[in-house]
Image (tube, grey):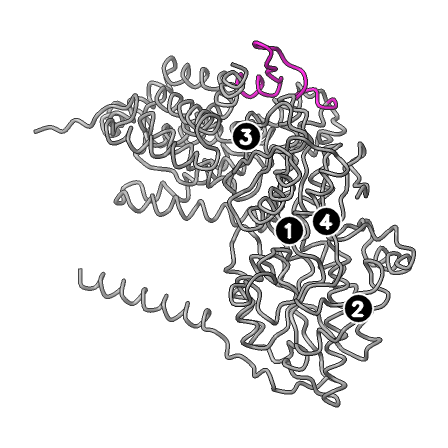
Amino acid sequence: MKKAIGAALAVIALAVIASSAQGAPKVAVSATAGYSCSKSITLPFITPLTGGAGFLGQEQSSWASYAVKTLAPGMHLKVKLVLGDTPVEQGPAPAQALAQKYIGDPSVLAILGPSTSGGVAATSKTFFAAKLAHLSPSATRTDLTQGPVAQREGSPAFFRDVPGDYIQGPSDAAFMIKTLHVKKVVVFDFQEPYSLGLAAAATTVLQKAGVSVSRLSAPNTTTDYSAFVTKVPNDADIVFFPTQKPGDAQTFAQQMIEQGKKAKVFGGDGSNDPSQFKVPGSYVSNFAPDITGIKADASLINGWKKANPGKQVGSFGPPSYGAVQILLDAIKIACAQGHGTATRAAVFHSVKKVRINNWILGGTFRWSTKTNDPLNAKFYIFQIQSNGSYKLVG
Amino acid sequence: MDTFIQLTIDAVTLGSVYALIALGYTLVYGVLKLLNFAHGDVFMVGTFIGYGVLQELGGSSSPKLSVWLIIPIITLAAMGGCALLGITIERFAYRPLRDAPRIAPLISALGVSFFLENSMQLLFGATPRNYNAFNFGNGYLYLKGFQIHGVTVPLLRIVTVVSAFVLMVALWFLVNKTRTGKAMRATSFDREAAAMMGIDIDRVIVFTFVLGSALAGAAGVIFALRVPTTVNIGFVIGLKGFIAAVIGGIGSIPGAMAGGLLLGFAESYVQGYISTQWSDLYVFSGLILLMIFRHQGLLGRPDIRKV
C-alpha cells in the first residue's frame, strides 16, 4: 500500500514538473531591445487553420504568405511568416499559449492577427505589456476598439484593417430596410459575443425604422435547427443569422426550405464561405469587396493565383495581404528611424504612421485619428446566386 | 396545430437518432456493466465513413447511383466500419481490464474517446463535412414528402425515422428471438452462470460491441444526412445518447428506445413552446427530477439486494 502511494506521488510530481516546464511563461523580450533589421524577422500569424473556422485561416494565410514573399524583398527586409493555429472550438487557450511563445522570441517585432475577436480579447493585454503591435485582418468585434478605453477588450497595441461590427450590424440592417424593404425580421444570436453584438446593433436600427423584430437565441452547440425554424413566422422577410460557422448557416437555410418558410437567410461575415454556405437567394455581408472587380489589383491577383493554383479569390484573404503590407511598412519605418535596428516599441509607434495609396481593397488606406480602426471603412453585402457564387449587391 | 405537428416531426426525427445511440450504450452496459464513453466518438467516425463513401460514389451533386441505393450503401459501410472499430476497441482497451475494478475500464473508455477524436482531427482536419443531401435531385429529399394537416413531412425525415425504426425492430428481434440474443441476455443476467452453461462469453461480448457500434455507425449516417459533421460532434450527441439510455433505464433495450424518443420530444417541445435560449436548462432540470423520483429510469429494473 505504501509503495503504491509512493509511486502515485512520484507520478504526480513528475506530471507537475513536466507541465511546468512546458507551460512556464517565456521571459518577455524587452520592448526597447534593438533587433538588427539585416537579420531574419519572424512575423507570426495567429489564426484558425483547423476547426469550424479553418477556412478563414487557410485563405488568410495564403494571402499573407504571398504578401511576405512579394513585399519584403522590395523593402530590404528578410521576413519569415510563421503560422500559429487557434481552432475556435478550443476557446482562447491556444491563442494565449502562442502569445507567450512569440513574446519570448526576440526576432518577433509585430504580430499578424489574431484573426478572431476572441483571440484578440484573450491576448491583447499581454501583447501590449510587451509593446508588440498586433494587427488583425478579420477581428470585427465592436468592443475591441469602441467604448470607454478602460473597458475595451483590445489594448492600445491592437490594430485592425477592417471595420468593426458597430458598422456591420447597422449596415446590414440599413440594407434590409432600404433595399429589401423588410417589414418583419427574425434576429438570431448564439449566446456568444460576436453574434450578440451584431444582433443587438441590427435590432436597434431595425426597430427604429419601424420593422417588427423577434429574437431567437440558440446555444452555440446547436447542430439541428429544426425547432428554431418552426418558430420563424411564415410572414417573416429575413432571418438575420450571424453565425461564425458557415455550415450552420447552410443547415439552417436548407431547413427553412424544408419547412416551406419564405424568409431569406442573411448571414454576417462569419458565414462568408462559398464552399459551405451556398443556398441561392441568401445574403452575406463582409468587410471586403470582391477585389477581382478592382482593375488596379489585376496583376496582384494573377500573381497570387500563380502561387496558389486552383484556388479562388475570396473576401478574407485580401485584408490579410493589406495587414502584412501595413506591418512591413511599420517595420521599415522603425528600421529607418533606428538606423538599421528596430525595437518593438518603435514598430508599435510606427503602425499609425502608415498610409497606403493603392490599397488592395480600393482607394487609400488611412487610420482613424480616434481609434486603431481604418478610416471610412464599410461592409459589403453579397447575394448567393443559383450557381453558388456571391454577387455584390450592396 | 401546424406548429405542434412540425415540432412532433422534429421530435421523432431527433429522438430516433438519440435512441439508436442509446441502444449502443445500453447493450454494452447490459452485458459488461461498462459505460462505453467512446460510443459517441464511434458515432462520429460513422459520420465520416459515410461521408467518405458518399464522395467515392460521386457525392450528392453528381451521384453515380440512385439516391435510394446510395443511402443504404453508405449506411452499411458506416455500420461495417464502426463494427470493426468496436471490435478493435473491445480487444485492446476493454478486454485486458475485464477483471479490473470498474473504474479502470471507465478511464480507458474516456481515453479511447479522446484518442478517436484527436486521431480523426489529425487525419482529416477539423473542417466540417457536409453530405449536402439537399443536392440530391435538386432538393428532392427536402421538398417531396406527404402532408399532415398542411404540414409537409419531407422524404428525408421519413427515411430517417423509418431507418431508425427498422434497425430497432431488427435489434429487438435479434435479442429476443435468436440463440445469440438469448446468450446475450443470459450473459447480462449472470456472466458466470452463463459461462458455466457453456456460453462463449468472449464471443458474446464481441458481438455486443459489434451490434452497438454498428448502430452508432447507422445513427451517424442518419444524423449527418441532415446536419454537417465535425470531429467534435461525438461528444455532445454521445452525451445525449447516454442520457437517453439512463432515462430509459440503463441496460434495458425498450428503455433506451423510449429514453431516446422522450429526450427528442422534450428538446423539441421545450424549444418550440417554452424557450429556445434555455432549452437545455429546462430539459435537464426535468430529467434530474425524473432521476430523483425514478432512479432506475423509465423501464429499468430497481436493484435488488439480498439481505
Please, what secondary structure does the residue beneath circle 3 have? Answer: helix
Pick whichever of labels 4 and 2 is earlier in the sequence. Answer: 2
Q: Which residues are magenta?
A: B137-162
- Say what amino acid the circle numbered 1 marks: Gly
Which residue was labeled with disc 1?
A54
Disc number for residue A228: 3
Pick whichever of labels 3 and 1 is earlier in the sequence. Answer: 1
Please name which of the two marks, 3 or 2, marks the residue nearer to the observer: 3
Label 3–label 1 contact, CB within 8 A: no
* Residues at discs 2 and 1 both on one chain: yes
Disc 4 to disc 1, C-alpha distance: 17 Å
Please, what secondary structure does the residue beneath circle 1 have? Answer: helix
Specify the quadrant of the image occupied by residue A278: top right
Which residue was labeled with disc 4?
A286
Residue at x 71% of width, y 23% of height? B139
Within 10 Å of the Cα at label 3, are there few (<14), some (14-19), or many (20+) other Cα atoms? many
Within 10 Å of the Cα at label 4, are there few (<14), some (14-19), or many (20+) other Cα atoms? many
Please, what secondary structure does the residue beneath circle 2 have? Answer: helix
Residue at x 68% of width, y 27% of height? B134
Q: Residue A225: x percent and y percent?
A: 56, 31
Q: Toward the viewer: B207 or A124?
A: A124
Disc 3 to disc 1, C-alpha distance: 26 Å
Disc 2 to disc 1, C-alpha distance: 22 Å
Disc 4 to disc 2, C-alpha distance: 26 Å
- Say what amino acid the circle numbered 4 marks: Asn
Which residue was labeled with disc 2?
A69
Pick whichever of labels 3 and 2 is earlier in the sequence. Answer: 2
Left or right position of A225 against A257: left
- Say what amino acid the circle numbered 2 marks: Lys
Q: Chain of mark 2?
A: A
Q: Say above or below: A75 vs A292.
A: below
* Residues at discs 4 and 2 both on one chain: yes
